[in-house]
Image (cartoon, rainbow, N blue to C red):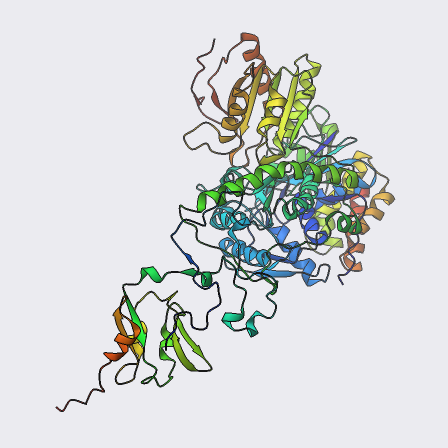
Amino acid sequence: MTEIRWHSRAGQGAVSGAKGLGDVVATTGKEVQAFALYGSAKRGAALRAYNRIADEQIFNHAKFMYPDFVLVIDPALAMTDDITMNDKESTKYIITSHLSKEELIDAIPALKGKEDRVYVVDCVQISLDTIKRSMPNSPMLGAFVKISGMFELDYFLENMKRVLKKFPQKIIDANMEAITRAYNEVK
Amino acid sequence: MQDIKLRANENRGIHQLESGNDLVGWNEVTQGSILPSFEGNANNIAHLKAEERSYSNHNSYTATVASWRVRKPVFNIDVCIDCQNCWVWCPDSSILSRDKQMLGIDYDHCKGCEVCVEVCPTNPKSLLMFNEHEELGTALSQWPEKKKKEKN
Amino acid sequence: MAEKYDLNEREVWDGNFAASQAMRQAKVDVMAAYPITPSTPIVENYGAYVANGYVDGEFVMVESEHAAMSACVGASAAGGRVATATSSQGFALMVEVLYQASGMRLPIVLNVVNRALASPLNVRGDHGDMYLGRDSGWIQFGAFNAQESYDLALCAFKVAENHSVRLPTMVHQDGFITSHTAQNVYPLTDKAVDDFLGDIKPVDDMLDFSRPVTYGAQTEEDWHFEHKAKQHKALMDSRTVIDEVFEEFAKVSGRKYNRVESYDMEDAEVAIVGLGTTVETARVAAKELRKEGIKAGVVAIRCFRPFPFDLVRDALENVKAVAVTDRSSPGGAMGAFFNEVSAALYSTPKRPLVTNFIYGLGGRDFSIEEAKRIFKEQKAHADAGHITTDIQQFSGLRGPKLGYFQTKRG
């Protein structure tokens, strides 16, 4: 069982990101779960989304988890939210920030001692460059593909095209570029 | 002159509402207390006259509330102008009329409310209230004369 | 003729989307709805399917949930296949008309995405609304995940419209935990659903001009009791039809449902009895505890109404201690579900020790760890031979421990 926790703000696409990831993972024959805690949350409110990935049907419906991956797609939330909650010694962090990894860890004391498991990528800037608006979910998926090693990039891109098929070609292309850039830039 | 079975099907008013004779067990009541109005195919029912329709036992046509009445309206055809006022106002559809011609009263369903008498515009009225036990002939023989306009 | 909707053999759908696809494939004729969180996407999606030509149906916009169910009553009495969805306050407003629908024996399907009742206002899942429908005369199915919200919605039409049943049917799923959680769902093809359901065969339909009928008769003390008894009998007798439909559905889908589901119960000493997603979380806990030597099992109610009194008894009579979980504020009593399970167990020879947990109100998380703790407490009761805690306790509640009533046995 692989468990993923997304830290995001309402409107940044963590829910779509989690569902898109679930959709692609399911094509590999695995069982997935993608959910979020929101409902009456307004745009900008902090929210968490979750993924579970397993070989067997997933029965656990609790939001409680010991995450294998923590994906933070809002730079400020990395500082204010409890992103290391219930983590494990192997939990990997992928954090959106314009800061370098060293600067970021200096700013977030909870990450001290976890340097080898922290990865940084500026999903906000990448999405501004490619999708032309702050939509950090797609780039985060690219970074996740790289860090998790769960898929080949090409396989993931092909399947994301299917997930995004209801959008105009221009938007699909921009998302593919965003995913690819983050895949290459995450450190 | 006025037959209380006027224009009536054989089963009009054949059972008393409160007799209790029709009470059946849970196994015999209709599903969902849904009540069919007619026996058999009713496709053409709108084009049939009441006395030609196959009303079912669930239809109020086959029940009578005659016993609820203490006084009854009596209809005098000699005075009536067929204005249909009583037909319009009767709350129990108990004015029998055909081709805009007033025929009489359905005494199976009339409750004696007197609305028909109240709305009758003729002088004297074509409908008047009498005791339930009064014979029609006697009632008609007591019909008042036309009232003269009172001088101021 | 409706447009073809492309489906994959394996989809990743949340419970709402899954239910809305079932509505499309069932070719619902009329959906009258007043959307409310968290069930909104079910009716919203159906509306989009109508607008985009994927289903030849009618979406009726109304001014309240009371009106929504009233319109459903009208459409169903007219003879159509009718469905809607609601939650929480919307469900509460619908309650008056729920009794009308069941009393008139109208096979409406209602997707209920369970959500807590205000006040305080809350949009997340608990079973307060489901409990409100307990005595309404509807059949009530419980789905524990997105796949089941789809499967049971299809079964619901087939049960409800069966001529020996003719009762409205609810399909419950947990708000957010099921409705907004995407999971693998394996849908049937449109053709398979067509073959399984067929067209509705109306009864006493008001659009049958050859047989005009009166709906909504008044019955005072001389008739009312007989009608309600007949209705109750129909609900009790629906058990056989439900079993047959589940059997038939298994042939089509490979997924077999039972009115009571038992997991790891063959040799179980302790059990959790639950409704909704809790069941699946508890199953994981039971499996883990078995590795520690605790013989734990889970009993789940798939069919909340008609209540499977005999099956619950059969499933639990050899267990030593049972925790019955109520996800609804008990309002000054033991949990309603606890009372029903206890009543079933009272007529068994061994009478297991039964305790009541109030949990998960307003969507409060129910974790594997907490399920394990509850199992272990049951084990302690079983070892002591009597209930060692208060009979009613609260699980996952902050603040000083809250509990009520102690056993007189042991």
Instruction: Locate residue B123 relative to residue C318 in the image: left or right.
Output: left
Image quadrant occupied by the N terminus of chain A: top right
How far across and down, in percent of the image, does residue A20 sit? 74, 45
Residue C196 visible in the snapshot: yes
In the image shown, does C349 or A106 lie closer to the viewer? C349
In the image shown, does C111 or C388 lie closer to the viewer? C111
- Residue lying furthest left in this view? B152
Residue C182 visible in the snapshot: no
Q: Quadrant of residue C345?
A: top right
How far across and down, in percent of the image, does residue C145 sit? 67, 37
Does A109 appear above or below C205?
above
> How many numbered discs?
0
Image quadrant occupied by the C terminus of chain A: top right
Instruction: Locate residue C3 relative to residue C235 in the image: left or right.
Output: right
Does B108 appear above or below C386?
below
In the image shown, does C105 or C173 lie closer to the viewer? C105
How far across and down, in percent of the image, does residue C255 sit? 75, 36
- Residue lying furthest bottom in this view? B151
Does B68 appear above or below B118?
above
Residue at image position (49%, 31%) is: C336
Q: Quadrant of residue C56?
A: bottom right
How far across and down, in percent of the image, does residue B52 sit? 53, 70
Residue at image position (26%, 85%) is: B123
